[in-house]
Amino acid sequence: MRDNNMNTTDRRQFVKAAGLASTLGVAGVAGCMGGGSDRGGDKFKFGVVTSLSGDLRFGGEVTRRGYDLWKKTVNENGGIEIDGSKYEVELSYADAKSDPSTGADAASNMISNESVDAVLGPYSSNVTLAVSPIMEKNQTPHITGSAESPRIWEEQYKHTFGTVPTVTLIARQAAEEILSLDPAAESVYVSGVNGPFSKATASAMRNAAQNKDVEVLAYDLNPSDTDWTSVVSSAKDADPDLHFHGGHIGSHVSLLKAADQLNYDPNGFFCHYGVNTSSFKDGLGANAAGTFGATVWLPGVERTGGKLFGSAADYAEASQAEFGEAPDYTQAGSSAAGIVYQQALEELGAAPPLSDSQKSKLVSIIEDIEVKTFYGDVSFDKEGDFYHNNTSTSPLPIQLQDENEAVVVGSSASASEADYPVGK
């Protein structure tokens, strides 16, 4: 999903996937290296490039939980069935360290030195934009369960797909719903981090305000290491009805902490990604209550069900049992990416390891696939600005209310009443 949003000094170092098993203690990191001809044929082997350290480690861990829960559940069911035989799933992790060049190096190393059948992609848009050309060069299937920047899909990568709709759609539609709450806002202050995902988020928020004829008092993009107290001070002077922020969990928490310190109290804050994650709630405690966000999935929202997990509630229960916390839409989208591969491999009908021609055919199958999952129906656009993005999952505006639980707000028939103006 995303780009850098917190300070880091741990950059541009290369960590081999095998080394991660001892240094990070990540389950499922590969110990099996070497060319495809030396690999055993008893398992489908997926490479995973995501951020397990650095600025975006919180989001990277969310993707890891999603991929791991898919693997665990598939293997508990005997594996992926091909011609009456079942093959288990193996995940080989490489740490992008929240840095695009490190992610690209890790992806290149994985393709060159490990025999992976396909790749599950990064948390962040920055890293995804760096990894996707590697997948293209090596003609390797690549599905990200997280990245949302529209730039990814505008590049028209043949081998890259994404289960989460672009933030252009999510942030705009949720923002328009929040701007329509009673009393309708007359002004908004838009801030954000100046990176691919966060900039696209802030831009979509600004466009939503303009579409609703709401005055945009500022469009304020900043580096990831910004002192957010200065941004809040400027926003407080502007005195908007609402404050919209495009960023990640770290910048959301820093912004809202600064707002509390400076007694900046607009009618509401809208931070697109992560408000219903434990990282956001733990970072702000009681001050998280009332924050608006956006999602494409919640455990209590019924979707089509289908393959592997019967319903959203079933998936949430499995996540709670495995990790001790409720999943968010990034975790759900990451598990859905695995389910897409699962169905595509069953349609391919080839046992592991896959040949280059079989990988190419797998890409064609994914391009045409339609999968019913606990996350919703998944299919991928075949042309246009959202090429290979799953745009069929509908965005939902949410708000943290009692005990910081996320509820759907807005105009839908199933929506709860918003606490708005917040706390007033």
Image: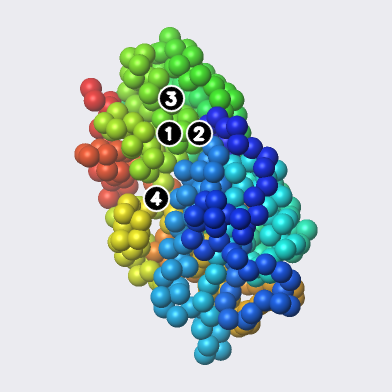
In three-dimensional space, the C-alpha distance between marks 2 and 1, rounded to whole angstroms, equals 7 Å
In the rendered view, tell whether residue 3 sits above or below residue 309: above
Residue at 21 percent across and 39 percent down: it is 402
> What percent of the width, then of the height, locates residue 260?
34, 19
Q: Position of residue 318 (x, y in %)?
A: 33, 63
Amino acid type at mark 2: Gly
Q: From what the image shows, is residue 72 above or below residue 331?
A: below
Separation of residues labelled 3 and 4 (CA atoms): 21 Å
In this figure, what is the number of numbered marks?
Answer: 4
Q: Which residue is mark 2?
A: 247
Q: Quadrant of residue 149?
A: top right
Quick check: marks 1 and 3 in contact, CB under 8 Å?
Answer: yes
Q: CA distance from mark 1 to mark 3?
A: 10 Å
Q: Which sits earlier in the primary sequence, circle 1 or circle 3?
A: 3
Which of 188/341 is in front?
341
- Upstream in sequence: badge 4 or badge 2: 2
Question: Which residue matches tag 1?
Answer: 271
* In the image: residue 200, left or right of residue 275: right
Query: Residue, x 43% and y 63% (percent of image)?
Result: 69
Picture quadrant of residue 182? top left
Residue tagged by mark 4?
A: 328
Q: Secondary structure at mark 1?
A: strand
Residue 322 at least partly seen = yes
In three-dimensional space, the C-alpha distance between marks 4 and 1, rounded to whole angstroms, equals: 15 Å
Dot label at residue 255: 3
Residue at 45 percent across and 80 percent down: it is 78
Tell me the element at label 4.
loop
Mark 2 secondary-structure assignment: loop
